[in-house]
Image (spheres, coloured by chain):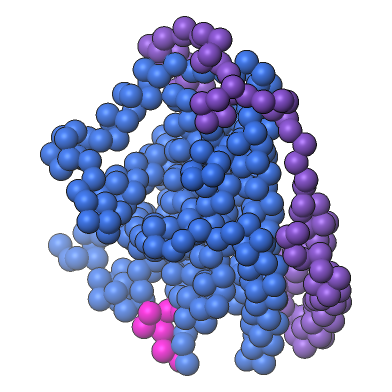
């Protein structure tokens, strides 16, 4: 097995370790803890009064436009990291290219700003 | 017998098979995640904050309240595990797993010494930033599946906040990557140890000196990613009870709690690797000791160095947490999008220009 693969196997093992740790803790606690649910106890908490209406209440998701912007900048980050790693070899040409790229993105951000979508209304 | 020959030891782990090596790493992972989390929660969250607020904090359990964590553990073990009747049971039960998994995956890449590392990914920084956002999924799961209005609002707020501050976090780290020319965390440590400041290499070149702005943005973004105050809108106790954790009790709640504070430590570890020079001692110290900067002894000293730096950074995190009043939701978003992101883009441009110029 190659070292490269082994490194990622450790990553997978760590995920499994976290999962196992939580399962062990909760499993151990289940041996000790009581379980006596009453109708009042399993009600949703709404500051002590009876819950009103559906719990999955409709709320305005104000940041869907932020999510779009996030996708834009996150993809940008995917491009920036390889560039940042190899900047020493790319030199001035790479720098100018990336400044143009970032400038276009900043234009997008400025447009969103100007349009007022960065306000949480 | 000279000092140098005393230092030349046959380290037993050099010849271990892979499975034994990995098993030991798993044990150390639990230690590296849970012990600092418990330590900083007692030291900072219980005691330091109490002193800052002119009170004593826990004093009853053990000498000076030092056994308080065990008492809390005992309390939470005995608590009933309540599932709200309307909750989406599977998702509700799985959410703590996802949050703690994010923490452990984040810990995978942190190096504690030249060989004392869990794994040495070539894309270490990138991997860390990627898995740190997995916790958003867990938080959204918890918020949605609880079927409670407080939880839902808290989960949505958390998602919005983590999205907004993910970007400054990523972009602030790019400055470090430009300077080091690598994504590998071990090589970033090496770069900080071996670069020089105007021809003087006595303390190497910890990137906090050249990436001061980057470090500032990184720390603010980490504070927000951890939903620590002043960015604690998602768990604002005076309006949302406990945000996405409202309906959790007993050990499931404790898992969120551990996840939050363990992640704070891991981010502090990452911050010290990226900006404070990681596990390496400054070159003038290693010169005095007469060892190579990456001698095997650093596997023993390195974790101590990392722990010290981690305590420094977490001190700042808790200090800020209990000093500043809470941001309002719109201020929070405005701060990320209109201040931090443009600033970090400027930081990248300047760092890139200087890198090419010199």
Please name the residue shown 33% across and 24% down the image.
Answer: B75
Q: Is residue B302 left or right of residue B244?
A: left
Viewer-side residue, B59 vs B131: B59
The picture's colour for chain A is purple
Asked if residue B33 shows in the view, the reply is yes
Q: Which residues are magenta?
A: B199-205
Q: Position of residue B165 (x, y in %)?
A: 64, 60
Query: Which is the main secondary structure of the residues drawn in magenta?
Result: loop
Image height of B338 relative to B244, above or below: below
Figure chain in blue: B
Q: Is residue A101 left or right of residue B258?
A: right
Q: Name the residue rendered at 75%, 69% in the picture.
A: A80
Q: Is residue B306 visible?
A: no
- Residue B141: % across, % down: 67, 33
Say left or right for B314 vs B159.
Answer: left
Residue B315 rendering spot, x and y as whole percentages: 36, 60
Q: Quadrant of the N terminus of chain A?
A: top right
Viewer-side residue, A108 vs B20: A108
Up-down relation of residue A114 to residue A73 (above or below): below
């Amino acid at each position: 097995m190659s070292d490269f693969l082994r490194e990622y196997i450790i990553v997978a093992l760590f995920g499994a370790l976290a999962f196992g740790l939580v399962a062990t803790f909760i499993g151990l606690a289940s041996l000790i803890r009581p379980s006596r649910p009453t109708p009042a106890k399993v009600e949703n908490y709404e500051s002590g009064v009876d819950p009103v209406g559906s719990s999955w209440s409709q709320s305005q998701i104000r940041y869907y436009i932020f999510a779009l912007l996030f996708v834009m900048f996150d993809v940008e980050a995917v491009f920036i990291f390889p560039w940042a790693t190899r900047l020493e070899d790319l030199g001035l040409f790479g720098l100018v290219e990336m400044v143009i790229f970032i400038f276009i993105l900043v234009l997008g951000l400025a447009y969103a700003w100007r349009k007022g979508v960065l306000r949480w209304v | 017998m000279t000092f140098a020959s005393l230092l030349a030891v046959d380290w037993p782990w050099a010849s271990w098979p892979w499975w034994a090596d990995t098993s030991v790493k798993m044990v150390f992972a639990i230690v590296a995640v849970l012990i600092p989390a418990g330590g900083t929660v007692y030291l900072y969250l219980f005691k330091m904050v109490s002193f800052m607020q002119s009170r004593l904090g826990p004093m009853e359990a053990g000498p000076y309240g030092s056994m308080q964590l065990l008492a809390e553990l005992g309390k939470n073990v005995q608590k009933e595990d309540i599932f709200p009747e309307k909750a989406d049971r599977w998702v509700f039960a799985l959410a703590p797993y996802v949050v703690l998994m994010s923490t452990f995956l984040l810990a995978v890449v942190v190096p504690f010494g030249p060989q004392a590392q869990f794994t040495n990914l070539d894309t270490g920084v990138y991997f860390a930033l990627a898995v740190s956002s997995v916790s958003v999924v867990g938080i959204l799961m918890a918020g949605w599946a609880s079927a409670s209005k407080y939880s839902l609002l808290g989960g949505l707020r958390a998602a919005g906040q983590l999205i907004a501050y993910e970007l400054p976090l990523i972009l602030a780290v790019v400055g470090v990557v430009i300077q080091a020319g690598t994504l590998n965390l071990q090589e970033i440590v090496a770069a900080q140890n071996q670069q020089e400041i105007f021809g003087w290499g006595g303390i190497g070149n910890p990137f906090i000196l050249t990436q001061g702005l980057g470090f500032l943005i990184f720390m603010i973004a980490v504070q927000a990613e951890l939903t620590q105050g002043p960015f604690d809108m998602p768990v604002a106790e005076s309006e949302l009870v406990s945000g996405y954790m409202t309906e959790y009790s007993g050990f499931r709640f404790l898992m969120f709690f551990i996840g939050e504070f363990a992640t704070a430590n891991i981010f502090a570890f990452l911050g010290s690797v990226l900006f404070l020079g990681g596990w390496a001692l400054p070159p003038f110290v290693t010169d005095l000791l007469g060892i190579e900067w990456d001698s095997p002894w650093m596997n023993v000293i390195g974790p101590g160095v990392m722990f010290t730096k981690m305590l420094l950074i977490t001190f700042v995190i808790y200090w800020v947490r209990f000093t500043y009043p809470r941001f309002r939701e719109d201020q929070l978003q405005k701060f990320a999008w209109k201040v931090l992101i443009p600033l970090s883009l400027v930081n990248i441009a300047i760092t890139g220009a200087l890198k090419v110029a010199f």
